[in-house]
Each structure stands twice: as C-alpha cells, then as structure tokens.
Image (cartoon, rainbow, N blue to C red):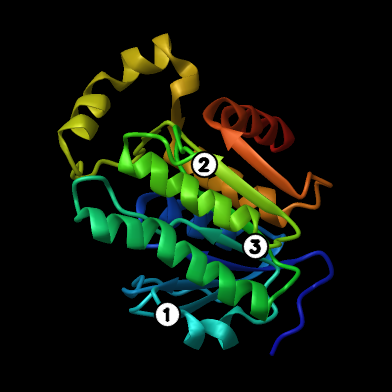
Amino acid sequence: MSVPTVGQKRLAIVGATGMVGGYALRYALDQPTVECVTAIGRKGLGISHPKLREVLHQDFGDCSTLAPALSDQDAAVFCLGAYTGAVTDVQLRAITVDYTIEFARVLRSSSPDASFSFLSGSGADPTGRSRMAFARYKGEAENALLASGFLRLSIFRPAYIYPVEPRKEPNLSYRFMRGIYPVFRALFPNQVIRTDDLARAMVDVVTAETGAAPSQVFENRDIRSMVRSLHRLHT
C-alpha cells in the first residue's frame, strides 16, 4: 500500500456514475490534496487514472465485503440516490435510508476517523412529519448519520441541481426546471446550484483542513456561499 504525501487524503466516493458523483470524482482526481480515490459502485466508470481505484459492489444493502476497500480512508463522499417516481416507494426508502446507513456502518468500523459528506436534499425532514416520502427518508438518513459518531459529518441539502452537461431528464418537473432555469436562477438564486459547484463543495469540505464544526447541515444558500469562497481562493 502506498503512503500518502503529508496532507494528502484518501477519499472514497459512492455514486460516481451519477450526476453529482461524477463531477465529484473528476474534481477529486484533479486535486493535489487528494492522494487516491476509491470509487465504489455497481457499474464500471470506463476511465483510468493513476489516482483511481474502482471497486464494483452490487448489493448496498450489505456492505460488509467493502471493509477492506474502506480501511485507511480519510473521507467519503456519498452521492448514491434515486429520483422520486423512478423506483417504488420501498426501493426509494431502501436506497435513501438503508443503503446510507449500511455504508456508513462499514466505513465507521473500517476508518473510524474518516469524515463523511452526504448528499441529502432541500426539504429533508428529520421529524418524519413531511407528506413527501423523499423528505421523510432523507431526514431519516440524516438522523442516522448524526447518531453514528462521525468525527466530521457534512450534510448537503441542495435545492434544484442544474445539470451542467445536457442529459435526458428523469421526469417532467426536471424538464420544466431546465427549460426555465435562466429565469428561475435570476429570480430565486438561492434555490439553484450547479452540479459541478455542488460536487466541488462536497469534496472540499471533507478534504480541506478547515477546522469546521463536527456536524454541519448546509442548505442551498450555504452551499452557494461555500462555492463563492472557493472561487475566491482559486482566483
């Protein structure tokens, strides 16, 4: 096993074939602060990079076999998810809640000091009272993560995530939002976030030595503020 340069991080990314996870992967591979990236998913990425290690895993309901891959990790970015309406309610809860909890369990036991960055969503309801299944399930996942004992946990609650690259939209509401995006962004800037900006923030918050609070919840407005700060640092 290689020994990382002082200050560099070992990072695991779950969901790197998805929209946000894909940008998180590409960004992490380009960062000098990241020593290596372990991408965990059901499908191959079709790319190669000297920093990249791919681990194929089919059943996120049981992540026990991931323990070796998750040992000695400094941080993880969890972007696995499903769109409402694309799967049954039972599947949506399993993906949103059960998979998150199971992965976090194995990560905590394999790398107790690892930081965790979780892709939640605007409106996530930790009280469980929301009529929206997505909000209840994201809130349930957040509660479980907050109780899991991560030394640093960052929960991201983006509103509308704008897909920078053209794609086939998953449903009618996303097609509508993409069509009105320029106007919606001008009228409600704190209700939108670019995919690449969100991904960069999720990676940076767990790989940068910022002295941040142990557990933080970032609403869309907070994410946009983080992105502006990052832009200032890199210009």
Type of amino acid at the residue the image marks with label 1: Asp
Distance from Cα at disc 1 to Cα at disc 3: 17 Å
- N-terminal of the two: label 3 or label 2? 2
Residue 101, position as x, y percentages in the image: 50, 65
Residue 159, position as x, y percentages in the image: 43, 31
Pointers 3 and 2 in contact (C-beta within 8 Å): no
Distance from Cα at disc 3 to Cα at disc 2: 15 Å
Disc 3 target residue: 148
Q: Secondary structure at mark 1?
A: loop
Disc 2 target residue: 126
Residue found 42% across the figure and 58% down from its top:
97
Task: Give whichever of 231, 82 is nearer the camera.
Answer: 82
**Above or below for 218 versus 9:** above
Residue 203, position as x, y percentages in the image: 60, 52
Type of amino acid at the residue the image marks with label 3: Ser
Disc on res. 50: none
Task: Give whichever of 15, 217 is nearer the camera.
Answer: 217
Q: Secondary structure at mark 3?
A: loop
Q: Residues within 10 Å of mark 1 (few under 14, many from 20)?
A: some
Residue found 58% across the figure and 58% down from its top:
28
Is residue 15 visible to us here?
Answer: no
- N-terminal of the two: label 1 or label 2? 1
Q: Secondary structure at mark 2?
A: loop
Residue found 20% across the figure and 44% down from its top:
170
Disc 1 target residue: 62
Q: Horizontally, is 58 left or right of 120 in the view? A: left
Position of the N terminus, as image quadrant, is: bottom right
- N-terminal of the two: label 1 or label 3? 1
Type of amino acid at the residue the image marks with label 2: Pro
Q: Residue furthest left?
A: 172
Distance from Cα at disc 1 to Cα at disc 2: 24 Å
